[in-house]
Amino acid sequence: MFTAVLVGCASGPDDRPVTADYLSATIFVPACGRAACHSATTASHGYPFDTVASSNASLKQLVTTGGATGGNGRGHRDLLSTIGASSNAPHSLMPPDDPLPEADLELVRRWADLGYPGLP
Amino acid sequence: MTAATRLALIAMISALAIAAGSRVASAYPQFQPGRDPTCTGCHISPAGGGLLNENGLATAAQDSQFGGPPEAAHGALAGWSWLTLGGDLRFAAGAVEDHGLGPQAFPMQLEFAASAKIAAGFSANATIGATRGNNTVSSFILSREHYVMWQADPDAPTGLFVRVGRFMPVYGLRLVDHTALTERYGQTPLYGETYGAAIEYLADKYEVHATGFVHDPIQESQEHGNGGALYAELHPGKFAIAAQARYANGPDDVRTAGGGTGKYDISDDLVLQAEASVIHQRFTAGGPARNQLVSELVASWFPADAWQLDVGVGQFDEDLHVPKVDREAFDVDLSYYLNAHWNFMLLNRVQTIDFGRGGRSSGWCLLQLHYRL
């Protein structure tokens, strides 16, 4: 019923800002920073995503060092593949039970292509 | 056959197979607006959930297959007029569609609860439980709720209630399933409790809950903002309708939400529930604000004594301005209440993004074991 109302609500181009703050606030915090996942206390694999600041810091660590999963240039690929934004996606994608929409993944890809603007 | 189709088939076949073995009996009046319209008909809290009162305990025994003593630990932790104890243990196992269908098994809840009458009309209420922490012992322990409640008429399920402490501000249907999109995205996520003060008035035909809250500076909460929530419901008979509003101002965003809920008691064994909210979100760091829409429609059927079938459709659009980011969740959940303490739930979901056109679909088929202490 409600979904039917939505059809046609959004049909224009995706003109959302491609900045670290906006992506953290609109995509990474709500999708990754949930309780018992990448919240402040749990911070699974050492990455908190529960606030814009912590999300930006975790993204910075991921894209520059590869974080806990790699290092030395693997970061870029790890971030994109972990969320399913690249073709070499691992078996387990994040978020595990609630995948990101392709429109969000495309926004992250554009952000990566631009060199991750706005990261601290 | 796609993964989503496989999961849908698993859900349907499982539900039908188990339902086929059930027998005809009574319904669940505690869920029905026409019979027990307020949460305090069965729960100690005016918001529902958690510890059961005397009527709730009797209902838990009566509506299960084999009944038994419904009090805490089958009566071993009961008998005090001033103290009620309880708790919940949940474990789930099954298959989750995550870039390929794979097995999953995990604990869901280990939590104890207590309510103590401390003075005329006053009670102290608290929960303590385990959560997924990090490398410190304290991070694995969480008290979701701890509050003092004053009730104008302690012997009645209705009247004026005042609560001060840590609890979830009243908003929405308050479904037990935290993965329901209206729970996850509708401003009442798992571990979204805050500190606050609530004034709540419950009557036979209506109820009002007004809560002012601040975020928890010590324990983790999913709510980082401060604000308020208002929930007002009319339940004159076989149906209920409510209006709701919520405001939260946090360090990263400001959210203003509004919407409503509805419940319709179609018959003694069939109940419909619905919720819809629009959320306007502004961001501290700048960028355009966004509007979100989240909704849920659940039909609950009680086909036989101790059996309950819930069929739900949920929807969440994270940004109404952006195409193909709306999520849909299709749930078929079957519950069996073995006795006053044990129940089993077969949880099945297929979740899509823009009906499969906006991204990867997902889902699960899980058997949940629930032991109510």
Image (cartoon, coloured by chain):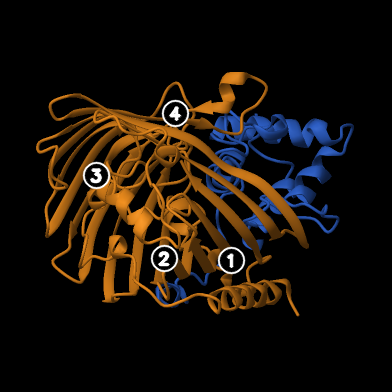
Chain colours: A blue, B orange
Mark 3 vs mark 2: same chain?
A: yes
Q: Which mark is residue B338?
A: none
Asked if B258 appears above or below A7 in the picture, the reply is above
Mark 4 lies on a secondary structure that is: loop
* Mark earlier in primary sequence (3, 2): 3
Q: Are marks 4 and 2 on the same chain?
A: yes
Location of the N terminus of chain B (image quadrant): bottom right
Q: Amino acid at mark 4?
A: Ser
B117 or B124, which lies in front?
B117
Q: Which mark is on residue B46? A: 3
The tag earlier along the polypeptide, 4 or 2, is 4
Q: CA distance from mark 3 to mark 2?
A: 23 Å
Residue at left 89%, top 32%?
A72
Q: Nearer the viewer, residue B119 or A91?
A: B119
Is residue B192 shown left or right of residue A23?
A: left
Figure label count: 4
| Cα distance in 3D space between marks 4 and 3 | 19 Å
Tell me the CA gap for discs 4 and 2.
29 Å
Along the polypeptide, which appears first: circle 1 or circle 4? 4
**Chain on which label 3 sits:** B
Q: Which chain letter goes with mark 4?
A: B
* Distance between mark 1 and mark 3 Cα atoms: 30 Å
Quadrant in which residue B33 is drawn: bottom left
Mark 3, Cα crowd under 10 Å, few <14 / some 14-19 / many 20+, is many
Q: Which residue is mark 1?
A: B349
Q: Which residue carries the number 2 mark?
A: B296
Q: Which residue is mark 4?
A: B143
